[in-house]
Image: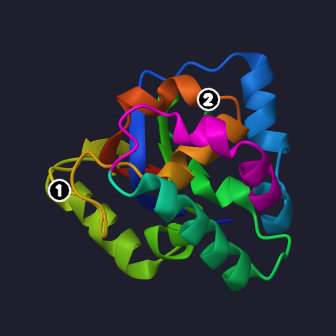
Amino acid sequence: MGIRVHKVVGYGCCGFRPDEETKARLRELDPTTDEFVAWCEAHEREILALPHAGRGAAFMLPVALAGLRERDGGSAASLRRCVAWDDEFGLKDAIVVVPPESAEQWRRYDDFIDWAEESSSARRGRAPASRFEPLRVGLYPNSRGEVPLSVGAVLLYYGLGGLWSGLEECLYVWWS
């Protein structure tokens, strides 16, 4: 087994200290796309009530969910791919959430170019290390500071709604 680099761009924060129940939810809850969309539809009022939801939020949530359902076809697509948190190999207090509709493009691991880029830091006098970097740009198609409601839906699904107001655009890298 080799050492792999993981990279994710999304909305995250540091200072995350989950209790054992939360850790278990993050490791074990993994609904199908249809189950997650149905949960979102049943909790739409709660999702839309998130503060600073951004312009057009009431319109964008159903659009994002419809796109997710169409892309995955109700399959057992992993919702866990939307949450980057690894208390064994990553930064123990960092968590990043990717919009489910963007998970395929915003998260990757075991990419040779990423490995070469991150490994080259050792040649610059630093050992390859996990890092959480806030970004100073919005993540298309959102403006800076505008977090998609689908991210809020993922947080609420996992019982992490309290993280919503502290999220920022970021890059998270860790090795395993």
Start-end of magenta stretch: 37-54
Q: Which residue is mark 1?
A: 137
For the N terminus, give its image quadrant.
bottom right
Is 83 situated above or below 24? Answer: below
How many residues crowd mark 1 within 10 Å: few (<14), some (14–19), many (20+)?
Answer: few
Examine the residues drawn in magenta and state their main secondary structure: helix
Is 89 situated above or below 125? Answer: above
Query: Where residue 95 sits: x, y (%)?
Result: 50, 38
Applied colour scheme: rainbow
Query: Where residue 58 sits: x, y (%)?
Result: 50, 54
Q: Which residue is mark 2?
A: 160
Q: Is residue 47 magenta?
A: yes
Q: Nearer the viewer, residue 61 or 5?
A: 61
| Whether residue 86 can be seen here | no
| Whether residue 48 can be seen here | yes
Q: Quadrant of residue 140?
A: bottom left
Is 107 situated above or below 31? Answer: below
Residue at horizontal 28%, vertical 70%? 117
Query: Where residue 160 sits: x, y (%)?
Result: 61, 29
Image position of 47 (left or right of 172) = right
Residue at horizontal 58%, vertical 29%? 161
Is 4 situated above or below 83? Answer: below
Residue at horizontal 52%, vertical 29%? 92
**Badge 1 amino acid:** Val
Image position of 58 (left or right of 155) = left
Q: Nearer the viewer, residue 6 or 56?
A: 56
State the mark number for residue 95.
Answer: none
